[in-house]
Image (cartoon, rainbow, N blue to C red):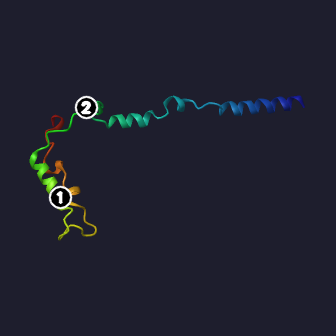
Amino acid sequence: MRGKYFGTVVLILLITAGCGHYGALTKDYGNSYNMAKSGQILNPGASKNLKPVTGLPGTAVDVTMKNYTQSFATSGQAGQAGQAPAALMMTPLSLGAGKDVYGK
């Protein structure tokens, strides 16, 4: 009787001891996500620079603002269902701005 009791207690202790810790999960939890996020940030110190952004070519700004203003017009093509406003379709990079950004 005593042997069965002792064997049962040892078996229960062994089973619960294997499930009692998380192992490497607690040490590295979230590291993969944080490394992937930090790998996509081009300039980590950009949030410290509070100066306004300058240097966008005037022609790109003119075309973008013109299309943005025309997207609110009530005549003709503006306001048709399923058509995106022109301001959303015209971006400065599609006009050629930013070609020499980051030394490329």
Q: Where's residue 58, x and y in %? A: 10, 46
Camera-near label (2 vs 1) is 1
- Helix, strand or loop at disc 2? loop
Residue 55 coordinates in the image, percent (x, y) = 13, 39
Q: Residue at x 16, y 53 (%)?
A: 65
Please tell me in which quadrant of the rendered image residue 78 appears: bottom left
Q: Local crowd at mark 2 within 10 Å, few (<14), some, or many (≥20)?
A: few
The residue that mark 1 highlights is 69
Find the distance from the CA under tag 2 to the CA under tag 1: 30 Å
Residue closest to the eye, 104 or 50: 50
Residue corresponding to mark 2: 49
Residue at the left extreme, as displayed: 59
Disc 1 marks which amino acid?
A: Thr
Q: CB atoms at circles 2 and 1 under 8 Å apart?
A: no
Q: Residue at x 20, y 61 (%)?
A: 71
**Picture coordinates of residue 80, whole percent (x, y):** 24, 70
Residue 64 vertical placement versus 42 (above, below) = below
